[in-house]
Image: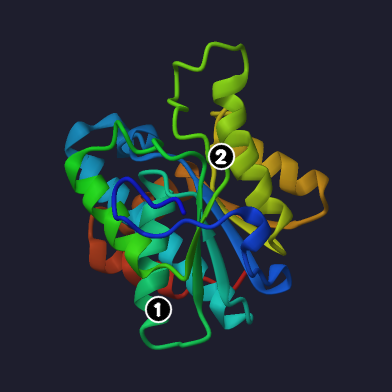
Amino acid sequence: MLTSLDSGTVLISPENAELRPERTICITGHREKAILPYKDDPENIHLTRAVVRLMLYRYIDMAIEKGYTDFFSGLADGTDLWAAEYVLLKKQSNEDIRLIGAMPFLRHSRFFRKDVRSLLCDVEKNADCIVLLNSDPSVVYGKNGRPGTDADLYKVRNYYMADNSAAVLAFFDERNPRSGTAQTVNYALKQGKKVRSFGLSDVYHLMDEAGVSFRDIGRIVKGLDNIF
């Protein structure tokens, strides 16, 4: 039996995961470092990240309103863990909601900051299950010795989530076409999955409209039409 190196949570194989693809959303998105501040002003970085999270939460609410109950998180920093944290919050008031973590390999979090690792532990402990896609305990990103091996670690995770979901929710910056998020979105589209996304241009547009008032931004986001 394998357990998480961070939380001690029992990990299950893909073959043993009890999934409900027709009710499942795959959530994918960029890591925190990929979020550029509004107007390229470093002083706006915290507000910019907050607006990304606010839009992500609204899109999750939209999915729930349309009957989706199960949510995949790839357990990376940024979008993945922010979404997982919010799904767990919604789960407290809706017993039908399930959070499924998709762990690419055991040592995936070795470069996470302390605060991100702490969030990861909370997510793993409270998720309905954590699926481990590569069970080789010796695998370390960047040290696997074969061309393409590292990229494949995340590709397998990304494709697994998309294959076992009815729709994909993405925080996707089209200016970053080589990202894992782009890979997931493009694969899902080829498989005929429903894809709903927003990007930094949408975030900046909101901030243009509402200024730097987080309350006004929140009011606009709350009023967005359901796109699912």
Residue 207: % across, % down:
34, 52
Residue 171: % across, % down:
51, 48
* Residue 92 shown left or right of residue 223 in the figure: left
Vertical placement of residue 5 versus 42, above or below: below
Rendered image quadrant of residue 166 = bottom right
What residue did someone put label 1 on?
A: 90
**Any part of residue 144 in sight:** yes
Q: Residues within 10 Å of mark 2 (few under 14, many from 20)?
A: some
* Residue 51 shown left or right of residue 28 in the figure: left
Residue 84: % across, % down:
41, 61
| Alpha-carbon span between mark 2 and mark 1 | 29 Å
Q: Amino acid at mark 2?
A: Asn
What residue did someone put label 2 on?
A: 134
Colour scheme employed for the rendering of this structure: rainbow
Vertical placement of residue 48 versus 42, above or below: below
Foreground residue, 162 or 48? 162
**Which badge, 2 or 1, comes first in the chain's sequence?**
1
* Element on which disc 2 rests: loop
**Any part of residue 54 in sight:** no
* Residue 193 shown left or right of residue 199 in the figure: right
Q: Residues within 10 Å of mark 1 (few under 14, many from 20)?
A: some
Rendered image quadrant of residue 165 = bottom right
Foreground residue, 25 or 102? 102
Residue 200: % across, % down:
45, 43
Residue drawn at (39%, 52%) of the image: 3
Vertical placement of residue 178 versus 129, above or below: above
Extreme-front residue of the structure: 1
The C terminus lies in which quarter of the figure?
Answer: bottom right
Q: Amino acid at mark 1?
A: Lys
Q: Are the two marked residues, 2 and 1, in contact with CB atoms closer than 8 angstroms?
A: no
Residue drawn at (60%, 21%) of the image: 149
* Residue 227 shown left or right of residue 186 in the figure: left
